[in-house]
Amino acid sequence: MKKVIMGVLLTLVLAGTTVLARGGPSGMAGKSPVGHLYLTEKDSSTWEPVDGGWGKMTYKEGWFVFNGHELEPGISYTLISYDEVWVNTESVELGTGVANNEGNLHLMGDLELVCNYYEPNEEGDYQDITGAKIWLVKDFDGSFVWPPTGYLFEEALITEYCEMPELN
């Protein structure tokens, strides 16, 4: 009976670890110079997370490491810092790779961010802040397929390296 109880407890602990690994607080932790950003698939009409692919980006000024999971095997993905302005999109490609047979992807490189400013009267989640959007997109050629399927979107903006512009 002890072995059964221990087995159930171990299963619950491991299941809890898996859930925690899919998300957590994004941004810098305390005084650490290293930040974390979680990306998830989202419903493009509500922007709520949905079951599917996910990833974690670890970053520090000048570099990043990204690990994606539950992606479509054999598909090329590009991690971008996304410019919100559709008319003059100046998104930066951070790294490109192909998801392996298990649906995992590992990217690393130089951190170059496109900072977006959201004014107080704009609708949405990011009002009156400046920050970089990070997306993982499929088969990127400079344009996007919309509505997106299998894209990963940031859970928060990277704000540490973006300054608020002066308002007149």
Image (spheres, rainbow, N blue to C red):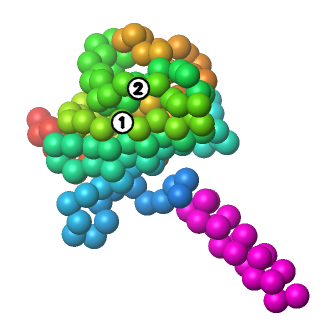
Q: Nearer the viewer, residue 115 or 140?
A: 140
From which residue to which does the magenta span run? Answer: 1-20
Q: Residue 146 vs residue 36: left or right?
A: right
Q: Nearer the viewer, residue 168 or 24?
A: 24
In the rendered image, the quadrant that contains the C terminus is: top left
- Check the image and report above or below for 161 versus 97: below
Q: Nearer the viewer, residue 163 or 11?
A: 11
| Residue 26: % across, % down | 40, 55
In the rendered image, the quadrant that contains the N terminus is: bottom right
Q: Residue 167 vs residue 52: left or right?
A: left
| Residue 153: % across, % down | 48, 36
- Name the residue located 61 percent from the left edge and 59 percent from the top edge: 19
Q: Nearer the viewer, residue 50 or 20?
A: 20
- Name the residue located 15 percent from the left edge and 38 percent from the top edge: 165
Residue lying farthest to the front in this orientation: 3
- Name the residue located 84 percent from the left edge and 80 percent from the top edge: 4
Q: Residue 45 vs residue 33: left or right?
A: right
Sort mark 1 into few (<14), some (14-19) or many (20+) by Cα contacts within 10 Å. Answer: some
Asked whether 125 falls inside the magenta stretch, the response is: no
Question: Which residue corresponds to mark 2?
Answer: 97
| Residue 98: % across, % down | 46, 25
Residues at circles 1 and 2 in contact by the CB criterion of under 8 Å: yes
State the image quarter where residue 7 is shown.
bottom right
Element under disc 1: strand
Inter-mark Cα distance, 1 to 2: 7 Å
Q: Amino acid at mark 1?
A: Leu
Question: Which residue corresponds to mark 1?
Answer: 107
